[in-house]
Amino acid sequence: MSNAREQSLARQRVVAGSRIRLERFLQRRGYQPITTPMIEPTDLFLKKSGGELAARMYSFTDPSGRRVSLRPEFTSSVVQAFVDGDLPGPLPQRWCYSGPVFRYEKGGDSGEFEQLGAELIGAGSVAADAEMLALAVQGLTVLGVRGHRLRIGHVGVVSAMYEALGLSERSSMFLMGSLAALRSGSESPEGVRAKAARLGLLAPEENEHVSRITRAMAPEDAAEMVRSFVGQGVAGSTGQRTPDEILRRYLKKLRLADEPGAFEKGLALCGELARAAGPAARVRGRLARIASRFRIRKSVLAPLEGVLTALEQYDLRGVPVILDLGLARGLAYYTGLQFDIEHQRIHGTHALGGGGRYDDLIGALGGKRSTPAIGFAYGLDHVARLLPAGFAEDDLDGPAQVLVTAQETAFSEAVATAERLRAQGIPAELDLESKSDAAAAKYARQRGIETIMRVGQDGRVAEQFV
């Protein structure tokens, strides 16, 4: 066997060992295992996932003509099972899962990755947020990982800050999407402003007054006013659009565009938030000062403050907590808290894993009522790189198996002995043919069994190691 093949198999065993220990960790905290289909309708992942995930999915048409995809993540599948009524029981519900997911990665890396995670459905409190954060941190600590850190953002808080400045929802979403690029320096404020203008988010200065008037008017009145201003200029059809289509599009741009002054405030706030990332103890005060400078009520920070206060009740064993409102996880379904687990030895976006709150996803996938939910997942392939070779070998192999044998007259005692071993979690195989000592030893070696227990007529057990 080649050295590369041996290394690959060894790494697979480390992944499997970490999966076993993490599943045990989650189940002890009330998270029940669930399985989901590996192939799902493509639309399931497109409804709220956003364009980034859609561009990385492996999709194809099945023999029935349906468009389907290999699952790129588990959350949507778990939520769909809940919506379909396949997960009965009272709320909140706690579920955990593990298995392969499939996403295209640049650079030619394999598109198959091992993922393990948990979902908490039906709890919308900061206590639920804190439980999920603590699970994500403590699970890695249980594995023996050291040097990881927790990075926290909050979509709801950032959105509320932009709303307080009077920005439209489109501009707010655009600026939130620009936070990470501004923080990394890959985009400048000038570049963000120019892109906003190209997208029609920013009213040109010559149209600013008209834009402000149309936003204050009823739609039908605004349409009549614009038609009276520019109707003669589009009396004939232009290209493929009719005059009415041109007027409606122009009016839509006027009404949706933000005033340059409001957008500039939003852009300035965006820059402040991008620079505010750092240790939670320091950044909490800085965010309060930023809100004050922009005349935003500090109450908008309450959801984030509540989560951090609730998280203080957990022992994170010194794992650093970083506040970063520029965090963007790339999935459009997040509505509040979102977070990443990082390690300096593992590079790349969302290296070890992360998650967030997705309160709108259940409704988007057909749920009859609004139901809060939050979840996270690890990338086990990356986690395994932080663990030593041979990690959790004992967990993989399980308890040593035992062969229980006896003479025919003591068979009932052999059955009772095997049942006691099984009740203790020890795999026990019963010799049904009352083999001789030599035959039993040969059989055990062939089966990879290391221990034989021979039961005598008096009920005494003689133990033999093969």
Image (spheres, helix red, strand yellow):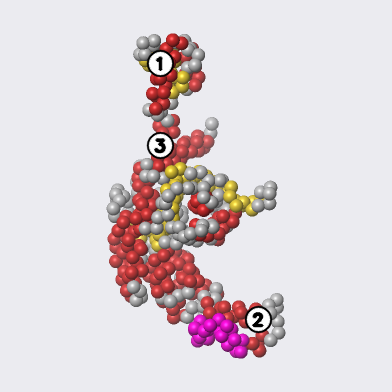
Q: Position of residue 268 (x, y in %)?
A: 40, 74
The residue singled out by tag 1 in the image is 413
Q: Disc 3 marks which residue?
A: 391
Secondary structure that dominates the magenta span = helix
Secondary structure at badge 1 equals helix
Q: Nearer the viewer, residue 417 or 248?
A: 417
Q: Pointer 2: what residue?
A: 244
**CA separation, marks 2 and 3?**
69 Å
Which numbered disc covers residue 463? none
Q: Residue at x 28, y 53 (%)?
A: 313
Q: Which residues are magenta?
A: 207-229
Of the 4 image quadrants, the one containing the N terminus is top right
Mark nearer the N terminus (1 vs 2): 2
What amino acid type is highlighted by mark number 3? Phe
Mark 1 is on which residue type?
Answer: Glu
Query: Was residue 122 drawn as part of the magenta stretch in this picture?
Result: no
